Image (cartoon, grey):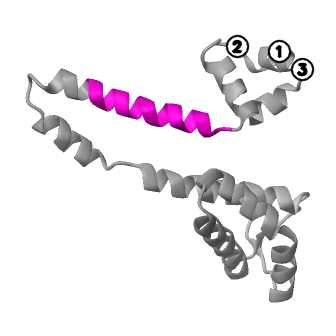
């Protein structure tokens, strides 16, 4: 598990051809951006060419690749969405004391709208699980019983 196993171009091309579609789909689900998803997958394979695969046994390369791609996509989304802390501090400092509560309320409402829109974009089965967990305060096992599915499926949704 320590160190990297070198990979040659032919092996990489075969892996790319075999796994690209699934990896691209996984990245696109997260980023909602076709070009960005393609870039993430291609960068991942270029990284494999440079550093190789982890030594040891990878029992399911597709799952290993999908997990890596998902992490890269989430990292990118988090970088894009982060607002620098100093900007928030500056905004709060510049608010006058009489406008502070109404401005804070508007900011909270704006963020709440973003969250609601994000939840509405989720597939129905993911949204249902989220609502049962957050609003009904049900545990994964309870949701699984309600939906007649496994707790593992509930956790993945």
Q: Position of residue 136 (x, y in %)?
A: 65, 12
- Which residue bears the numbered disc 2? 138
- Crowdedness of circle 3 by 10 Å Cα count: few (<14), some, many (20+)? few
Residue 22: percent from left, percent from top = 80, 61
| The N terminus - image quarter | bottom right
Residue at image position (25%, 41%) is 88
Q: Position of residue 57 (x, y in %)?
A: 89, 62
Q: Which residue is mark 3?
A: 148
In depth, the one of 114 and 79 nearer the eye is 114
The answer to whether the residues at label 3 and label 1 have Cβ atoms under 8 Å apart is: yes
**Looking at the rendering, which quadrant does residue 142 occupy?**
top right
Disc 2 secondary structure class = loop
Label 3 and label 1: CA atoms lie apart by 6 Å
Asked whether 118 falls inside the magenta stretch, the response is yes
Q: Is residue 117 above or below residue 15?
A: above
Q: Is residue 81 left or right of residue 89?
A: right
In the image, taking residue 145 as reference, residue 50 lies left or right, namely left
SS at mark 3 in the image = loop
- Up-down relation of residue 140 to residue 55 (above or below): above
Q: Are marks 1 and 2 in contact (CB under 8 Å)?
A: yes
Figure quadrant of residue 123: top right
């Amino acid at each position: 598990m320590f160190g990297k196993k070198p990979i040659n171009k032919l092996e990489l091309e075969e892996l790319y051809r075999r796994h690209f579609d699934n990896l691209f789909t996984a990245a696109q689900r997260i980023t909602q951006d076709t070009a960005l998803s393609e870039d993430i997958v291609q960068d991942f394979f270029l990284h494999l060419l440079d550093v190789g695969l982890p030594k040891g046994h990878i029992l399911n390369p597709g799952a290993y690749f999908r997990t890596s791609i998902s992490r890269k996509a989430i990292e990118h989304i988090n970088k894009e969405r982060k607002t620098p802390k100093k900007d928030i501090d500056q905004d709060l400092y510049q608010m006058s004391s009489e406008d502070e509560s109404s401005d804070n309320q508007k900011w909270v409402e704006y963020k709440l709208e973003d969250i609601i829109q994000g939840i509405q974009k989720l597939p129905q089965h993911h949204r249902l699980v989220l609502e049962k967990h957050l609003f009904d305060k049900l545990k994964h096992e309870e949701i699984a019983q309600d939906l007649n599915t496994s707790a593992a499926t509930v956790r993945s949704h």
